[in-house]
Amino acid sequence: MTKYVIEREIPGAGNLTPEQLKGISQTSCGVLSKLGSEIQWVESFVTGDKIYCVYIAPNEQLIKEHASQGGFPANSISKITAIINPVSAE
């Protein structure tokens, strides 16, 4: 399956409380369980005004459906074509 990075513009995301982030996570997991095993949430990174999420899915449409059902923005969806890290330099 393909990995994607989703950019979600959420003003003040970096100021969300742990309880608010837990609620967002619970909503996301609830939608994922309805959509089935083809789509998986790997992890998310919270910054000042955005949340960057890594998902595994067969296509962008399923990611858009997750966003729609969850009430989340999906301002940008980018297919990951390669992953590099410090080991890549060896």
Image: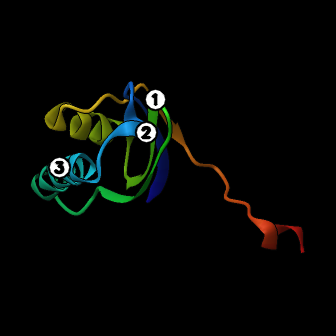
Q: Quadrant of the C terminus?
A: bottom right
Cβ atoms at labels 2 and 1 below 8 Å apart: yes
Measured in 3D between alpha carbons, the distance from the residue under mark 3 to the one under mark 1, in whole angstroms, is 18 Å
Q: Residues within 10 Å of mark 2 (few under 14, many from 20)?
A: some
Residue 40 or 24: which is nearer the viewer? 24
User: Label 3's element?
Assistant: helix
Mark 2 vs 3, N-terminal side: 2
In the rendered view, would you say 13 is above or below 2?
above
Mark 2 vs 1, N-terminal side: 2
Q: Most extreme residue toward the right, as rendered?
A: 90
Relative to 24, 9 lies left or right: right
Which residue has dot 2 on it?
A: 14
Which amino acid type is marked by label 2? Gly
Quarter occupied by residue 36: bottom left
Mark 3 vs 1, N-terminal side: 3
**Figure coloring:** rainbow
Quarter occupied by residue 66: top left
Count the numbered circles shown. Answer: 3
Q: Which mark is residue 49?
A: 1
Quarter occupied by residue 62: top left
Cβ atoms at labels 2 and 3 below 8 Å apart: no
Which amino acid type is marked by label 1? Asp
Q: Which mark is residue 23?
A: 3
Measured in 3D between alpha carbons, the distance from the residue under mark 2 to the one under mark 1, in whole angstroms, is 6 Å
Measured in 3D between alpha carbons, the distance from the residue under mark 2 to the one under mark 3, in whole angstroms, is 15 Å
Q: Residue at x 37, y 28 (%)?
A: 10
> Could you say where residue 7 lies in the image, as x and y percent from the top left?
46, 34
Q: Quadrant of the N terminus?
A: bottom left
Relative to 52, 31 lies left or right: left
Q: Residue at x 50, y 40 (%)?
A: 47
> Could you say where residue 79 lies in the image, as x and y percent from the top left?
53, 43
Which amino acid type is marked by label 3? Gly
